[in-house]
Every structure is written in C-alpha cells, then in structure tokens.
Amino acid sequence: MPSWEIHNEIAVLLGFDRVSSELVNRLIDDTDYVHDLGRRVPRLGIKMMFFDPERFVKKSTDLALKLLKLSRHPDLFYLHHALDLLALRMASAILIGCDIRDRKDCVIEGVKHDLNELDYKLRKMVRDLPSAEIPIYRREWLVEKLRNNYQKIVGMPGFVGWVKEKIVDRRVEEDKQEIGHAVKLLWERSFRATEGWSPEWIPNTLYNRKLVEEVKAAVRARRSLGIFFHEVNKLAARRSRLFDYVLVYGSDALSTISEKLLRSNRGLGKEVKRAILEGEPTPDRVREIVSQNWVISGLKEIPPGVIDTYVGLLLEAAPIMKTYLGGGDDM
C-alpha cells in the first residue's frame, strides 16, 4: 500500500515522530514475515500445534515479539492500516469520477469499521496465544484525528499520485484484458490457491487411506470452484465499477462488502452461481438477483448503467465458466 514515505509524512502531519513511524512501517510490512501484519496474521492452527510443535513455538514467539513492539506505538499501528484502507477508497473514487473530498462521512465510517474488524481479529487471535499483547485501539481518538485532517490527507499530491500510479493505472490495464482470457487465468489461479491445502476436519487415519484422499480431493475441488466463482464475480464487479461505487458510497467494512456482495458461497454470488449452473441465465433473472442484494439495494446513488454493465459481464462470463466446469454436473 502507500509508500513508507507517504505513511511517514501523514504521521508527522498528525503529530507523530518520523522515527517511530518508520519502525512501525517496517514491522507491519516485513516481507520476510507477514506483509500487512494485523490485517494478515500467520497461520497458527491446532494442527501445527500438535504435529509440528517446534514450528508452532517459533511462529507464535515471533508473532508475540512483533506485536509487543507494535504495542509500544498503538496509534501508529492503526494509523498505518487506516491509510492503507483509505488508499483503496481513494482509488475507487478516481475510477468512478467522484471527488473523495465530498465523501468524507462515508469514507471515514467505512475505515472505522475496517479498523474495528482488525481489532476484533487480533483480540480473537490473542485468546489462542496468551503470551501475546496487541496494540490498544483508541478508536475515537484516531477516528477524530482522521476526520479533522481528512481534507489535507486525501489532498496530498504525493498520496494522490501514488494511488493513481499503483492502483488506478493497474486497474485500468486489467480492464483491457479480454474477458475470456481473464476468466481462464482466474480458473488456473483458483486451483493453484488450494495446492497443498488440506481440510483439517478430515482425520488422517491409517485405515482406508484411499477413501480419505478421495474425500480430501473432492473437498479441495469444491473449495477451488468456490474461489473461482468469487473471483469471476469480483472481476465483473470491478470492471463494471459496482465495487467502487459500493466502496465509496457505502460505509461498510471492506470485508463486509466482500462477504455480502462478492463471495460465491454467500449472498449474491451464491444466487448467481445457482442461476448459471441450473440453466441459461437471462438478463432479467440475473438483474432480479442483483436487485435483491442488500448492499446494492441500499445504495441509491449507483447509476443504472453500472448494474446493467455488471449483469452483462456476468452473462458474458457464464458460458466461459460453464466450459471450464463441464456443465457443472458435479456441483
């Protein structure tokens, strides 16, 4: 997300010192550990605890140490993530031709929900790691800081320039890719995403090992298909700018938008998947499904053309998806 220099510049604007900001940036964006530490955390499951205790102890100790260091600069920790999340909304505003300065209340509220979820996730994780200490989230203080300096932050030439170059320009280039090729790449990526993944709830018994492997393969394939539908749905939502309108004109957390608007196993994605697999989806049927989604129906500012484009892209992608799914008989 935004360069460390931009993070440092905004931190100084809000009254923090540059040295502490630099330290927090390095801890959060450690490419040798977990990038965006906080929004992402290392996997420390029960399976690792029992079957690879040495690795579990090392990973949990490393995580606890990093969190301890970050706990000494809690406001900078949450500010770093707030700016990363703000950058996404700034990019969406540019892509739909909206002035981000006019969307202050929605954007601030959305970022606040993002940070609330980050804090909740960290607290939940600490319950499994009693030795870890997490940064204290002073929500009202930080949100007020962002609100009072909002116009200065979103108007910083360096910040705006970075968003245009690193996010907007990339999105525009992605949109030029022929949709059939894009869907093919998503199909390949979906199955690569589950390589090496194994559902922990299936016991690795010594008996009937062949059956166990068959069940694992089936579950893995189903997971891959779920990822595939999610990614195709996201592709259509991004290219139509539906995702960007929801991100800028709504006030939900990014994860909520993804779950209620995009995921293939919930909400809209589930219904679209069913319509595609059960027969030839018509524009009216898909549009009906879309109109019932609570995220979309609650945003009156979305131009009708955006929904039409979204529906059109889903219908264009449908026969391509069915080609890869072989008709979807096993779903």
Image (cartoon, rainbow, N blue to C red):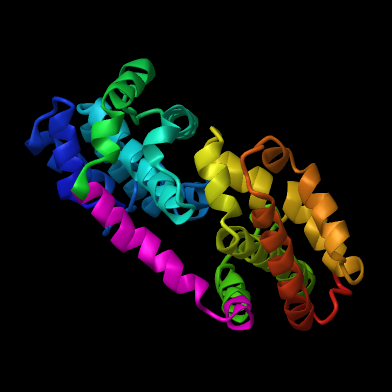
Q: Can you give x and y, in whole percent of width and height, for residue 155 in the image?
A: 26, 40
- The answer to which image quadrant residue 65 occupies is top left
Out of 215 and 11, give the one closest to the viewer.
Answer: 11
Point 36% across, 23% down: residue:
143
Out of 282 and 229, give the one closest to the viewer.
Answer: 282
Out of 326 and 70, give the one closest to the viewer.
Answer: 326
- The answer to which image quadrant residue 318 occupies is bottom right
Q: Is residue 42 left or right of residue 220?
A: left
**Residue closest to the far top:** 140
Point 89% across, 72% down: residue:
280
Q: Can you give x and y, in whole percent of width and height, for residue 220 in the image?
A: 68, 67
Point 44% across, 34% down: residue:
103
Vertical relation: 321 (above or below) 198:
below
Asked if residue 53 shows in the view, the reply is no
Out of 131 and 77, give the one closest to the viewer.
Answer: 77
- How many numbered discs sit on the rendered protein? 0
Where are the magenta residues, as a range? 158-183
82 inside magenta stretch: no
Prevailing secondary structure class for the magenta stretch in the rendered image: helix
Q: Can you give x and y, in whole percent of width and height, for residue 194 in the image?
A: 59, 68
Q: Can you give x and y, in whole percent of width and height, for residue 231 in the image?
A: 61, 64
Vertical relation: 314 (above or below) 108:
below
177 inside magenta stretch: yes
**Residue closest to the far right:** 279
Q: Is residue 57 left or right of residue 153?
A: right
Location of the C terminus by quadrant is: bottom right
Asked if residue 51 shows in the view, the reply is yes
